[in-house]
Image (cartoon, rainbow, N blue to C red):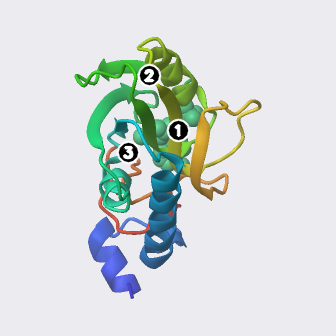
């Protein structure tokens, strides 16, 4: 159990309003998602593609709960800068080197807000002719008017707050928190 002093030590004294998903809750859901993904791909080559940096902790926990052969690679894109409001722009900074053609791709994201990032990335990835393409997001703010149909695995619906921890940042801080908190 984390107490206030421990949280304060981890955040350098910056306030988090409340813990929205604690470590145990996240671990339970990630294990379920691993089972869902294992069951969804009985055959074929599976490539788990993490969107950096936000997915790094989620992906590392998730792949250990997927009980079938798979490969891992990463994408780097940027949309927010240091802002807490979506700017609607997505820039690809790093492309996966792994061959995508013919493979089942599971694109792993920390959080979907407006859906712009995932819409743009699914367009880019579809052009590489994967065997299939699905999105696995830990959190979904679900305010997208038309969620991309590829969103197949969702950890939790997220409240309309700015969340940090378990990979999610605010201006690069707080990614290392083992829980997900609402930033004050
Ligand atoms: P979208 O393109 O509007 O769906 O925004 C998705 C991206 O915005 C994610 O990859 C996150 O990096 C970032 N993001 C959205 N909401 C939050 C949040 O509450 N905390 C931290 N990052 C967020
Ligand atoms: Mg981010």
Q: Which mark is residue 135?
A: 1
Q: Nearer the viewer, residue 22 or 4?
A: 22
Q: Nearer the viewer, mark 3 or mark 2?
A: 2
| Distance Cα–Cα, label 1 vs label 2 | 13 Å
Q: Nearer the viewer, mark 3 or mark 1?
A: 1
Label 1: element kind: strand
Can see residue 86? no
According to the picture, the residue beneath numbered tag 3 turns out to be 54
Residue 135, percent across and down?
Answer: 52, 38
- Ligand 2 - quadrant of the structure image: top left
According to the picture, the residue beneath numbered tag 2 turns out to be 130
Can see residue 40? yes
Q: Nearer the viewer, mark 1 or mark 2?
A: 2
User: Which quadrant of the view contains residue 76?
Assistant: top left
- Which badge, 1 or 2, comes first in the chain's sequence? 2
| Distance Cα–Cα, label 3 vs label 2 | 23 Å
Position of 60 relative to 15 (above/below): above
Query: Residue at point 30% right, 20% down?
Result: 93
- Which badge, 3 or 2, comes first in the chain's sequence? 3
Disc 1 crowd, CA 10 A, few/some/many (<14, 14-19, 20+)? many
């Amino acid at each position: 159990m984390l107490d206030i002093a421990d949280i304060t030590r981890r955040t350098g004294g910056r306030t988090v309003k409340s813990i929205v998903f604690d470590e145990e809750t996240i671990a339970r859901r990630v294990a379920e998602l691993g089972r869902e993904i294992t069951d969804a791909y009985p055959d074929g080559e599976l490539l788990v593609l993490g969107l950096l940096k936000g997915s790094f902790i989620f992906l590392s926990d998730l792949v250990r709960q997927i009980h079938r052969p798979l490969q891992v690679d990463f994408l780097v894109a940027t949309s927010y800068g240091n802002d807490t409001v979506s700017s609607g722009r997505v820039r690809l900074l790093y492309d996966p080197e792994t061959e995508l053609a013919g493979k089942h791709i599971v694109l792993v994201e920390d959080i979907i807000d407006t859906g712009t990032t995932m819409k743009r990335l699914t367009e880019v990835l579809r052009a590489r002719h994967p065997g299939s393409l699905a999105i696995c997001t830990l959190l979904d703010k679900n305010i997208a008017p038309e969620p991309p149909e590829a969103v197949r695995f969702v950890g939790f619906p997220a409240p309309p707050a700015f969340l940090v921890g378990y990979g999610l940042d605010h201006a690069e801080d707080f990614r290392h928190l083992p829980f997900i908190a609402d930033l004050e």
